[in-house]
Amino acid sequence: MKISNFIFPEARDSSRDAEYISDALEEAKLSEELGFDCVWLAEHHFDGNCCYVDPITFAAAVLASTKTINVGLAVAQLSLHHPIALAEQMSLLDNLSKGRFIVGIGKGTNYNVYEYDGYGVDPNEAIERYEEAQDLMIKAWTGEDGFSHDGKYWQVDGPALRPRPFTRPYPPTLQAASSDQGAMYMGRCGVPFLMNAQSDEMTLARLELYKTAMREAGFDEEHVARCMSELWIWRNVYVGENDEEAKEIGTPNFLAMIDHRAATRERVAAEKGKLNKANPVYRNPDIGLVTGSPSTVAERMNNLASAGVGGVLVQFKLGPMEQDVANASIRRFAEEVMPEISSVSANP
């Protein structure tokens, strides 16, 4: 099981943006030093919930500052951007990294309507835009003699994309899925995916639906095992010196993070006179959070490893948590948890 750091740092105070961004870059370098397989980067706009905002630009900085660790997007919001520009940028990162770059894609947030508003995109078009953008990016990556596309949102007829992808036919690409239906769809397609934060019980049940859908679609056991080995799930984690200390620090920071995001959505919705979707289940720390001593956290990680999960995106910096507190948790995880995880695959 591969272990990664999901660098998704909140920045409530705009006067500290430069500090937060610098801390995030140092966290990526620390992750390589401690042997993590990958760092993952998020995309969110306007609210400070992700300090570096643009994961593609930030990925370039991370790749330039590291030598061996993989860098993935979790995820690029395809519906907000022109797919040819994204295809070029991602191909460049694939070349700069010599294949260390993983393209994670999704349609965009289900909850932050202001992100669509700020980009002038109708959120009701998000799914269609996402599906069309994905198709167009693959055409651009694979069109050796050029590419053409006549869709609902984009009509293009271009020569061959440059630079060509370093990884052929194109960089490893994963879609996000956050429901039973999404997992079953990925299973019917026979592809691995990125899974959102949830309880271990829900994860294990969803994985069974995913594998069953693959088998019913005609994929053999070798293919099922390969997809499981390339699948990633998300966990918010705080590793303390003991269970009590971990709960005292991890739980309030996690709840503060969830509450701040919800309050931002509601405030913007009220200002614009729009209804806003709520996400009450995710606030439950029993669902979205893993806290404890190194041995407690290792036990939770081993539950996932025994289920055949390919990798875990671990978000360590939770909400308003100061960077030195997050770094201490990262070090405990790397030095005391990872050696106890069965079948762990670390960055060489």
Image (cartoon, rainbow, N blue to C red):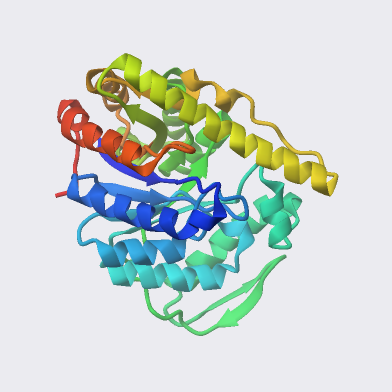
Above or below: residue 58 compared with residue 273: below
Q: Residue furthest top?
A: 244
Where's the N terminus, which quadrant? top left
Answer left or right for 344 relative to 288.
Answer: left
Query: Which of 49/186 is in front?
Result: 49
Q: Position of residue 64 (x, y in %)?
A: 29, 67
Q: Residue at x 60, y 51 (%)?
A: 107
Query: Which of 229/233 is in front?
Result: 233
Answer whether residue 166 is visible to the viewer in this image: no
Answer left or right for 336 relative to 307.
Answer: left
Above or below: residue 113 compared with residue 154: above
Q: Residue furthest bottom?
A: 159
Above or below: residue 109 compared with residue 213: below
Query: Which of 17/191 is in front?
Result: 17
Q: Position of residue 106 (x, y in %)?
A: 54, 50
Q: Quadrant of residue 282?
A: top right
Q: Residue at x 33, y 43 (%)?
A: 5
Q: Position of residue 138 (x, y in %)?
A: 48, 65
Q: Residue furthest front?
A: 15
Q: Residue at x 44, y 42 (%)?
A: 193
